[in-house]
């Protein structure tokens, strides 16, 4: 392999990382929706094995009995009930460790064998830093539900989930750059419109996490009106507008469903605007298709009152949609000179 040429092994490794994070999002969603996330009140980086005998399970259960969740919500739990929620959180945490190993060990090998150029190396270190941040935010999120109140902060949940999405998206971006590192593109292309789409999408994803954290999907299960209102009176229930739109179930759901319409409209408009562009037609069309599917999944999940299978699909497809936007941004940034930028919005 020539120096600076992309290695197929490195690209496969990055694709595996993307796949594992997508899987982790599914596991995380199932952990949250089965109310399993606060089941492990004692965790060390050194220990990896779950309780192996009845005495160990009883000891773990006794630790759980000291938590706010058990005291306020699950005091009726038997040992079997506890075990059923413990396993999801255990799988969630162990799969997170596995992702770390899958990134760190091959990365060291690829650096040693010089399959990653010096120019690209800092980008791979950013991936590792994002992964470490994601793990730290996971601990920070869970900690908020182990003191006083039996629920995690929806702000911390949003930070944890959004960082996972950003990490996965950045890996995809690095993969595209690594693949095309020896190609030359017009550097003057405008990406302003693509960034506007991305900003709106990330804002929507953050509010989706707010909806999940506050369990706001279980209120106003009607569409397009909110229980007969364009804006339900409960949206303004709290003392200030900012509190109502960021901390009340009705207010958070209102922002999320409204932004869903806005992002949907922007995506359709973008696909129409670039329909004749040979270079940008496919990525803008794919983005519009992903947004449409995600929009329909969101409405269906709301109308069915958040069944687990739809809620998890809606969550993981949000990441798929964000990855489609990464390809769109990359295409805007690296479009062929012959296309120019005059076709932009």
Image (cartoon, rainbow, N blue to C red):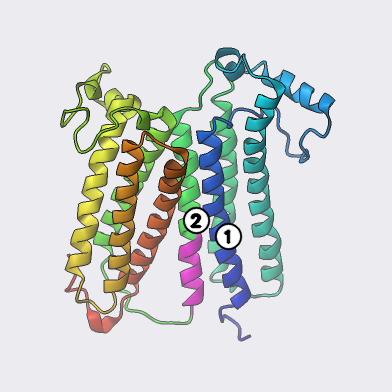
User: Can see residue 297?
Assistant: yes
Residue 50 placement: quadrant: top right
Residue drawn at 22 percent across, 46 percent down: 261
User: Bounds of the magenta span?
Assistant: 171-181
- Which residue is more in the foreground, 254 or 106? 254
Give x and y (percent) for residue 35: 54, 30
Q: Count the marks: how many? A: 2
**Secondary structure of the magenta portion, mostly?**
helix
Residue drawn at 56 percent across, 82 percent down: 5
Residue identified by numbered label 1: 17
SS for callout 2: helix
SS for callout 1: helix
Please check the rendered image and state whether residue 275 is part of the magenta-colored stretch, yes or no: no
Q: Are marks 1 and 2 in contact (CB under 8 Å)?
A: yes
Q: From the viewer's perspective, is residue 305 above or below residue 310?
A: above
Give x and y (percent) for residue 224: 20, 38
Quadrant of the image for the N terminus? bottom right
Q: From the viewer's perspective, is residue 9 above or below residue 206?
A: below
Residue identified by numbered label 2: 168
Please check the rendered image and state whether residue 172 is part of the magenta-colored stretch, yes or no: yes
Q: Could you classify mark 1 by the number of other residues whose Cα lies within 10 Å: few (under 14), some (14-19), or many (20 or more)?
A: many
């Amino acid at each position: 392999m020539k120096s600076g040429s992309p290695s197929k092994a490195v690209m496969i490794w990055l694709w595996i990382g993307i796949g594992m994070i997508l899987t982790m999002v599914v596991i995380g969603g199932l952990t949250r929706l089965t109310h399993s996330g606060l089941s492990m009140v004692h965790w060390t980086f050194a220990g990896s094995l779950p309780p192996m005998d009845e005495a160990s399970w009883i000891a773990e259960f006794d630790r759980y009995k000291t938590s706010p969740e058990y005291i306020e919500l699950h005091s009726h739990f038997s040992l079997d009930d506890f075990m059923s929620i413990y396993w999801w959180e255990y799988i969630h945490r162990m799969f997170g460790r596995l992702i770390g190993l899958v990134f760190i060990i091959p990365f060291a090998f690829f650096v040693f064998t010089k399959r990653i150029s010096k120019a690209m190396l800092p980008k791979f270190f950013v991936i590792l830093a994002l992964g470490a941040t994601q793990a730290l935010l996971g601990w920070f999120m869970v900690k908020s539900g182990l003191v006083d109140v039996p629920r995690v902060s929806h702000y911390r949940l949003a930070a944890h989930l959004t960082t996972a999405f950003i990490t996965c998206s950045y890996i995809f971006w690095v993969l595209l750059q690594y693949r095309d590192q020896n190609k030359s593109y017009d550097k003057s292309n405008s990406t302003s419109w693509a960034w506007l789409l991305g900003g709106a999408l990330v804002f929507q994803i953050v509010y989706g996490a707010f909806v999940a954290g506050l369990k706001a999907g279980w209120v106003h299960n009607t569409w397009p009106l909110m229980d007969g209102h364009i804006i339900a009176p409960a949206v303004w229930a709290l003392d200030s507008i900012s509190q109502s739109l960021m901390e009340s179930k009705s207010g958070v759901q209102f922002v999320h469903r409204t932004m869903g319409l806005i992002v949907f409209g922007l995506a359709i408009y973008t696909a129409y605007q670039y329909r004749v562009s040979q270079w940008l037609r496919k990525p803008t069309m794919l983005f519009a298709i992903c947004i449409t599917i995600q929009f329909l999944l969101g409405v269906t999940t709301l109308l069915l009152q958040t069944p687990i299978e739809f809620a998890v699909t809606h969550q993981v497809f949000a990441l798929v949609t964000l990855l489609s936007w990464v390809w769109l941004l990359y295409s805007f940034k690296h479009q062929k000179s012959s296309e120019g930028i005059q076709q932009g919005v």
